[in-house]
Image: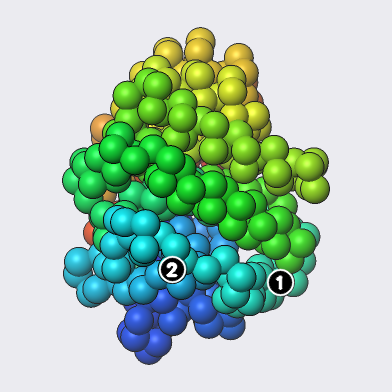
C-alpha cells in the first residue's frame, strides 16, 4: 500500500519545495528520497517506489494534473478520436525518471530491504483516463465498456502492453517484487470483472513472467469480495492484497490456500487509534499469520494518520 505521503512532515517539506505532485514523481533524486523516508523512520520490511499509477496516462500523452485538495484531473478519453491520439511510442522515455528513482533507491538500500515496483491495473487506470479523475462509481467507464466494448478493449489492450513494458523496466532497474493496484475492481459485475479485470491482469502477468519469471507479483483487486478467489485462481499472481471488507475467516479458507495474502487493517481505524487497533491487529495475526502472510493496511495510509499510531502498530505486529 502507499507508505509515503502527507502524514509525514519530512514528505510535506519536500512536496512544498517542488510544488506539483507530478514534478515530484519525475524528479528521481527527490522521489528516491521520499521513497526512503518511511523506511528510515519506521524500518518497514519493504519499500515501494514513489510514483503514481497515473504516470502511465501521462506517458501515453494524456494531460494529467494533480489539483491541490481535489486529487487527479485528466482530459477525459471518452471517444475514438481521443483514444487514437494516445501515443505509446514516447512512453518508455517519459518513464525513465521512475527507472532512475528505482536505481537510486536500490543502491541506497544496498540489498538490506527489497523494493517493490508497481503499476495500476488496466481497468483502474482506464477509470481515471475515461472519467477524467477519481469518480464515485466509475459510471462513465462502465457505460463506455457496455456501449462500445471493442473500443474500450483497445484502451485496455494499450494499457496491458504499456504497463507490461513499464513493469519490466522497473525490474531491470532493480525492483525485487511488483504490485498491480486494481483499486476500482469492485465496481464490476462478475462477467465484466472477468473481462476487464481478470483477463487483462492475466495478460499483464503472463507478459512480465515471460521475461522475469522469478519476480513475485502482488495483485490488489480492491472491493471485489468473493470474486477475489477467482482473481487469485485465474490471474497467476503470487500474492493478493486484501481490503478491510474481506472477512478474516473467508480470506483464510478461500485465498490463503492458493496464494500469499496481505492485509487488511482498516486505514481509518489506524487514524482513530486506541484499543480497537490493538484488538484488531491481534485478530488479523491470529487468523492469518500462521500461513504465508504479509501484514498490511486494507488500503493506502491516510494523510491524517498520527505517526504515533503507526509506531504503535509496528510494535504490536513485531511483538506478536
Ligand atoms: O507510498 C508510496 O510511496 C508509493 C507511491 C504511491 C502513490 N500512489 C503516491 C501518491 C502509490 C503506490 C500510489 C498508487 C495509487 N495512486 C493508486 C492505487 C492505490 C490506491 O490508493 O487505491 C491510485 C488509485 C492512485 C491515484 C491517485 N494518486 C489519487 C486518487 C491521488 C489523490 C489522493 C489524495 O490523497 O490526494 C493520488 C495522489 C498521490 N499519489 C499522493 C501520493 C503520496 C498524494 C499526493 C500529494 O502529496 O498531494
Q: Quadrant location of residue 148?
A: top left
- Taking the image as shown, residue 134 lies to the left or right of residue 32, namely left
Above or below residue 156? Residue 307 is below
Q: Nearer the viewer, mark 2 or mark 1?
A: 2
- Taking the image as shown, residue 57 lies to the left or right of residue 144, namely right
Judging depth in this view, the residue of 220 and 122 nearest the camera is 122
Can residue 47 be seen from the camera position used here? no
Identify which residue is drawn at 78% across, 42% down. Answer: 210
For disc 1, does the CB lie below 8 Å from ligand 1? no
Identify which residue is drawn at 52% across, 52% down. Answer: 159
Residue 103 spot, x, y in % from top left: 71, 71
Judging depth in this view, the residue of 312 and 291 nearest the camera is 291
The residue that mark 2 highlights is 85
Residue 316 spot, x, y in % from top left: 45, 39
- Taking the image as shown, residue 130 lies to the left or right of residue 2, namely left
The residue that mark 1 highlights is 103
Identify which residue is drawn at 36% across, 64% down. Answer: 82
Identify which residue is drawn at 60% across, 14% down. Answer: 257
Which SS class for mark 2?
A: helix
Instruction: Give the alpha-carbon distance from disc 2 to disc 1, as whole Å.
Output: 32 Å
Whichever of callouts 2 and 1 sits on the residue coming sooner in the sequence is 2
Which SS class for mark 1?
A: helix
Amino acid at each position: 500500500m502507499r507508505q509515503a505521503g502527507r502524514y509525514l512532515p519530512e514528505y510535506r517539506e519536500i512536496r512544498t519545495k517542488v510544488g506539483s505532485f507530478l514534478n515530484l514523481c519525475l524528479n528521481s533524486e527527490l522521489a528516491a528520497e521520499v521513497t526512503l523516508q518511511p523506511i528510515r523512520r519506521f524500518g518497514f520490511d519493504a519499500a515501494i517506489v514513489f510514483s503514481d499509477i497515473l504516470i502511465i496516462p501521462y506517458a501515453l500523452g494524456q494531460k494529467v494534473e494533480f489539483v491541490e485538495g481535489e486529487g487527479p484531473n485528466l482530459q477525459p478519453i471518452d471517444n475514438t478520436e481521443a483514444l487514437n491520439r494516445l501515443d505509446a511510442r514516447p512512453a518508455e522515455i517519459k518513464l525513465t525518471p521512475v527507472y532512475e528513482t528505482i536505481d537510486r533507491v536500490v543502491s541506497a538500500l544496498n540489498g538490506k530491504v527489497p523494493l517493490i515496483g508497481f503499476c495500476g491495473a488496466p481497468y483502474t487506470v482506464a477509470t481515471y483516463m475515461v472519467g477524467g479523475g477519481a469518480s464515485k462509481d466509475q459510471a462513465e467507464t462502465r457505460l463506455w465498456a457496455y456501449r462500445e466494448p471493442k473500443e474500450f478493449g483497445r484502451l485496455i489492450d494499450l494499457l496491458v502492453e504499456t504497463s507490461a513494458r513499464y513493469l519490466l523496466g522497473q525490474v531491470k532497474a532493480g525492483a525485487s517484487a511488483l504490485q498491480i493496484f486494481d483499486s476500482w475492481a469492485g465496481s464490476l459485475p462478475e462477467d465484466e470483472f472477468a473481462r476487464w479485470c481478470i483477463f487483462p491482469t492475466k495478460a499483464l502477468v503472463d507478459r512480465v513472467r515471460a521475461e522475469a519469471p522469478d519476480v513475485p507479483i502482488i495483485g490488489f483487486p480492491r472491493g471485489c469480495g468473493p470474486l477475489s478467489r477467482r482473481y487469485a485462481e485465474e490471474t497467476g499472481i503470487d500474492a493478493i492484497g486484501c481490503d478491510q471488507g474481506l472477512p478474516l475467516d473467508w480470506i483464510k479458507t478461500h485465498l490463503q490456500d492458493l496464494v500469499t495474502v496481505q492485509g487488511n487493517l482498516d486505514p481509518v481505524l489506524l487514524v482513530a487509534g486506541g484499543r480497537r487497533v490493538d484488538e484488531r491487529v491481534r485478530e488479523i495475526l491470529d487468523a492469518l499469520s500462521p500461513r504465508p502472510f504479509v501484514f498490511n493496511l486494507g488500503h493506502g495510509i491516510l494523510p491524517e494518520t498520527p505517526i504515533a499510531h503507526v509506531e504503535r502498530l509496528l510494535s504490536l505486529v513485531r511483538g506478536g
